[in-house]
Amino acid sequence: MKIALFGSPGVGKGTYAAKLEAIYHMPHIATGDLFRAEIKQQTELGKKAKEYIDKGALVPDEITTGMLKNRLDKEDCQNGFLLDGFPRTVKQAEALEGITTLDAIINYFADDEVIIQRLSGRRLCKKDGSIYHITNVPPKQENICDKCSGELYQRDDDKPEAIKERLEVYSTQTKPVLEYYQTKGIVHRVDANTSISEPNNHIIEDTQKILDNLKEE
């Protein structure tokens, strides 16, 4: 199964991907990880990408697509993969068609109010980077890391005003891509309004139903 995972910032896509990777034994391929790996290995594509990143510019689609193609050609992807962070534009979706054909888009969605609550409650440790949430995963002592006693802080882009802007940008960028795939009939929506830590959540089960049906086709 060749799957692409969609979802706004804070919807929990990375958590879901990790669980699905373990269930289906398919690699979770995040474009951010691709960039870091190629740059670390100092490949030609990695060097080119670093030039743009160092300038604060967007990495051109042909470089990103080239990295992705190299990754999808590896043996562990031959039976399927979970793609995360690509495609972000219709142009990228069209380029991906030249490499492989997706079986499904899993579009995780949650209300903006839910996303804002999740992200605005997040706190990070200045020393070791540990992540907490003032409601869901609070530290034992307010604003103090349980592990190293470092000070916890809120990132600027986790503040409500910034989150609203990020959600608007995501919606604007993603809508044309989803419409592109909807014409192909492969978009499946999964409600992610409940937290995966809640006993009654059904996010992974709903995703499994979709993927298992695909396997049977």
Image: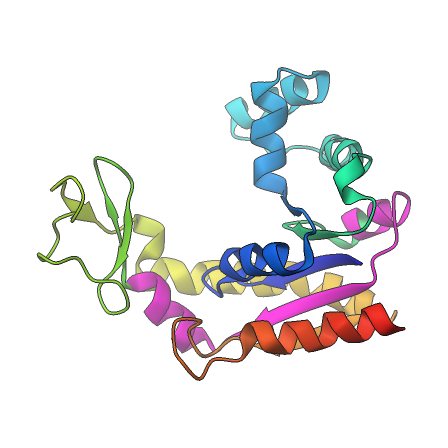
Q: Which residue is rendered at x = 63% and y = 78% of the image?
A: 206
Give 215 or 11, whichever is nearer the viewer.
215
Q: Residue at x 60, y 76 (%)?
A: 205
The residue lying at 52 percent from left, 22 percent from top is 54
Rendered-image quadrant of the N terminus: bottom right
Q: Nearer the viewer, residue 85 or 215?
A: 215
Q: Is residue 154 visible?
A: yes
Indicate yes or no whether the magenta region holds residue 116.
Answer: yes
Residue 171 occupies quadrant: bottom right
The magenta segment is: 92-120
The quarter in which the C terminus is drawn is bottom right
**Pick the front one: 168 or 78:** 78
Please check the rendered image and state whether residue 178 is part of the magenta-colored stretch, yes or no.
Answer: no
- The picture places residue 143, in percent across and down from the top left corner, at 12, 53
- Rendering quarter of residue 141: bottom left
For image coordinates 70% across by 51% down, the residue present is 26
Is residue 200 shown left or right of residue 151?
Answer: right
Residue 52 position in % (x across, y down): 60, 25
Q: Which of the 4 quarters of the picture holds residue 101?
A: bottom right
* Colouring method of the image: rainbow
The answer to whether residue 132 is above or below residue 55 is: below
Judged left or right of residue 169, residue 133 is left
